[in-house]
Amino acid sequence: MSEATQAEGLNPELKKHTFEAEVAQLLHLVTHSLYSNADIFVRELVSNASDACDKLRFEGTNDDSLYEDDGELKIRIAVDEAAKTITFTDNGIGMNEVDAIENLGTIAKSGTKAFLDKLSESQKQDGQLIGQFGVGFYSGFIVADTISVESRKAGEPADKGVRWVSDGTGSFTVEPITKDTRGTAITLHLKEEYSEGEDNYLDRSKIKRLVNKYSDHISLPIQMRKEIWQEDVKEDENDDTPASGEMVLTDEWETINKASALWTRSSSEIEDDEYVDFYKNISYDMDAPLTWTHNRVEGRVQYTQLLYIPKKAPVDLYTREQQHGLKLYVKRVFIMDEAEQLLPMYLRFVKGVIDSADLPLNVSRELLQESRDVKSIRDGNARRILTLLASLANSEDSDKQEKFAQFYAEFGDVIKEGLGEDAGNQERIAKLLRYATSTQDGLVTSFEDYKGRMKDGQKAIYYLTADNLAAAKNSPQLELFKKKGIEVILMTSRVDEWAMNFLTSFDETPLQNIAKGAVDLGDLQDDEEKAEAEKAQETLKPVVDKLKAALGERAKDVKVSTRLVDSPACLVVGEGELSPQMIQMLQQMGQDVPASKPTLEVNPDHPLIKKLESSEQFDDLAQVIFDQALLADGGQLDDPAAYLKRVNELLMR
């Protein structure tokens, strides 16, 4: 910064200073890029005022005289329509001339940061709520063409006050003033475009709304002068027409914020109705939440989390491009809505608030993506939500069990995405999943439940994916398992097959899709059955070879099945290959799907397969058997008309 010079023709004590060379560039960045939303200046100036009061509170723990017989810390906002100004006043620590030059003349330097740097390691914990001061101040130049600051440092004489003035370009002036009260008053002289029309910041109701939105939970009272309705005096006492009047300002100051953040209070002090009302306020949901969790997390990263699970899924739940996320506060100062970086995508239905003690107030979405602290918060939030859901799922309380059933009906498919997106919590997620089975229709069976019902000698958890429950229960793939009384998990969600690509075992027990690869029941299949299967392979070999020739490129292979009991045939894909349902889903999403051909397995004991050996319509019958197997597996025919023609011809013969 250049040496101070006396401003020409002005008070000889008025000194003009030039900003450091890079400050003008930084100021342009702050006012045009970092703070693209003009409303933010209210948040920043209130935040700075709160910081100044926090600093005084901290200093005052060692020196009561700094309060100067005024121990009620507060922030006041005054609007002057005639002068087109807004003034933010606090009775915090204040500044002297040196402080004003250092803290307001250099964007890259923070007065509060310097203050914290002077603290010993043992004191830093006590001063953690004191935020950084400096950059946010310059957001005022978005709406103001000139900013003037009058301040006096607590504990210094009245004549040691300072006035700092700048138009936010290349320089600023400072001069000594007499100020009877400690603290700081920042006055913004509004630009023309921000003192009228929709962007009129002289509108007191607009300022109140912004305080409620951004700073409602600042722990200090934020006050504005009270307005009352004053009726005009009627000249005629017998006049029955409605009285006219206007809103007039009084000398009374009223608090316009709640001055107490719900999440900063102990959960034992908060009634359920308060939690519900707060949820409705932040989520715009008419229904009460299903459940919530409220915790203060301490460790390397300190933050408070208040997280809600809604009762109903939003209409945009599966629109992954739609912004979701939590409200982010830093030291009770509102930073942004829908901070999606605070939750993994598969928990995007969660609503709530995170209040960090460590993140900077000027944090952006880009910085959130790169921050290690944010990753720690996101991981902590995920674990907390999954733990909350597990407590409902595993509870013996019927009300909590019903809540989990409600949750799973609305959001069960979404958390399955976490199997592929959150490897660290995969086991926690898997324990929450519920399915129907070949013996139970409702979504009530967990992998743990299934394992408890496995037959002696069963080495795998068997499952089957299908479009719906009816298709799954009637699938040819189930026939052998039904015959042997082996329970099979039935997965009927469109996300299931994708998700199961990432979950290969549960509690050290492998998961096996019965529609993929060979069926190996191990100890559940006796030697006699294995011998009969081998004999059938030899006996039916001529028919199998002829089927391969008839089907050509439609089938990867043809084999004699060991899994069929009542059906003539079924389609099987190899391990790691896409099923017909998955191929169909990907194609509907417009994705290019690599060619995949299934294997046709035929039942050697079925009359239709036996008839093939002597049939004169072998080729047509082979195509019909393949098409029926495809339909039974949930696939779609490439040429339905050709299929119908073949069936009709076979019926007429």
Image (cartoon, rainbow, N blue to C red):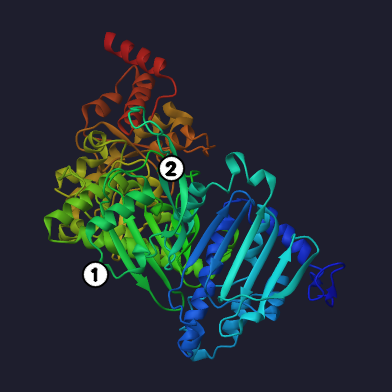
For label 2, the crowd category at 10 Å Cα-Cα, with few meaning under 14, some 14 to 19 and many 20 or more, is many
112 w.r.t. 408: above or below: below
Point out residue 158 in the picture as x, y percentages from the top left corner. 61, 80
Viewer-proximal residue among 207 and 117: 207
How many C-alpha atoms fall within 10 Å of the one at disc 1: few (<14), some, or many (≥20)? Answer: few
Using the image, determine if residue 363 lies above or below residue 594.
Answer: below
Instruction: Tell me if 89 is positioned left or right of 613 in this view.
Output: right
Of residues 240 and 163, the one drawn nearer to the viewer in this rendering: 240
Q: Is residue 127 visible?
A: no
In the image shown, does 572 or 526 lie closer to the viewer?
572
Q: Residue furthest top?
A: 652
Quadrant (top left, top right, bottom left, bottom right) of the C terminus: top left
> Residue 460's spot in the image, x, y percent?
26, 57
Closer to us: 524 or 93: 93
Residue 256: % across, % down:
42, 57
Q: Is residue 299 above or below residue 410?
A: below
Q: Which residue is mark 1?
A: 268
Looking at the picture, which amino acid does disc 1 mark? Ser
- The local secondary structure at tag 2 comes to loop
Quarter of the image for residue 270 reads: bottom left
Residue 245 showing in the rendered view: yes
- Please give the label number shown on residue 392: none
Q: Amino acid at mark 2?
A: Leu
- Residue 578, which numbered label? 2
Distance from Cα at disc 1 to Cα at disc 2: 52 Å
> What is the x, y in percent for residue 90?
53, 69
Q: Residue furthest right?
A: 8
Q: Earlier in the sequence, mark 1 or mark 2?
A: 1
Q: Is residue 211 left or right of residue 14?
A: left
Secondary-structure class at tag 1 = helix
What residue is at 46 percent from the left and 61 percent from the top?
Answer: 223
On-image quarter of the N terminus: bottom right
